[in-house]
Image (spheres, rainbow, N blue to C red):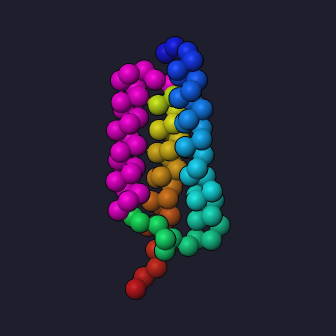
Amino acid sequence: MEVNSTEIIGLIAAVLTTSAFVPQVLKTWKSKDVEGLSLTMYSVFFVGIVLWLVYGILIESIAVILANVVTAILAFILVFFKLKYKTKK
């Protein structure tokens, strides 16, 4: 995998977009409040991210791979929290 100027732009974009999920994960972890999280949205999002990861592997793009590995982990954590902390009605 070659890291050229295009990949560097991709890596910067990956850091910015992926890090946007960190505050949500931390807030949910601390508060255990999952009322505002959509299980359907995060489940579909997680599957999409895994497919982007496969795509990144196929095209050998380190930026796409790294971004989607980290984002998949963060999205999975939010799905896990949603299932673990959901309120019973």
Q: Examine the rendered structure and indicate whether residue 32 appears above or below residue 45.
A: below
Q: Examine the rendered structure and indicate whether residue 51 appears above or below residue 32.
A: above
Q: Is residue 61 magenta?
A: yes
Q: Position of residue 25 (x, y in %)?
A: 58, 58
Q: Residue at x 53, y 22 (%)?
A: 7
Q: Position of residue 70 (x, y in %)?
A: 53, 41
Q: Residue at x 38, y 22 (%)?
A: 59
The mark total stands at 0
Q: Residue at x 63, y 57 (%)?
A: 23
Which portion, as a residue range, is magenta? 40-62
Decide if residue 71 is on the left or right side of residue 54: right
Quarter-of-image position of residue 88: bottom left
Q: Position of residue 69 (x, y in %)?
A: 49, 38
Decide if residue 86 is on the left or right side of residue 55: right
Q: Residue at x 35, y 62 (%)?
A: 40
Q: Which quarter of the rendered picture does the C terminus lie within?
A: bottom left
Q: Position of residue 36 (x, y in %)?
A: 49, 71
Q: Examine the rendered structure and indicate whether residue 48 appears above or below residue 81.
A: above
Q: Is residue 60 magenta?
A: yes
Magenta: predominant secondary structure element? helix
Who is closer to the viewer here, 88 or 72? 72
Decide if residue 89 is on the left or right side of residue 12: left
Quarter-of-image position of residue 57: top left
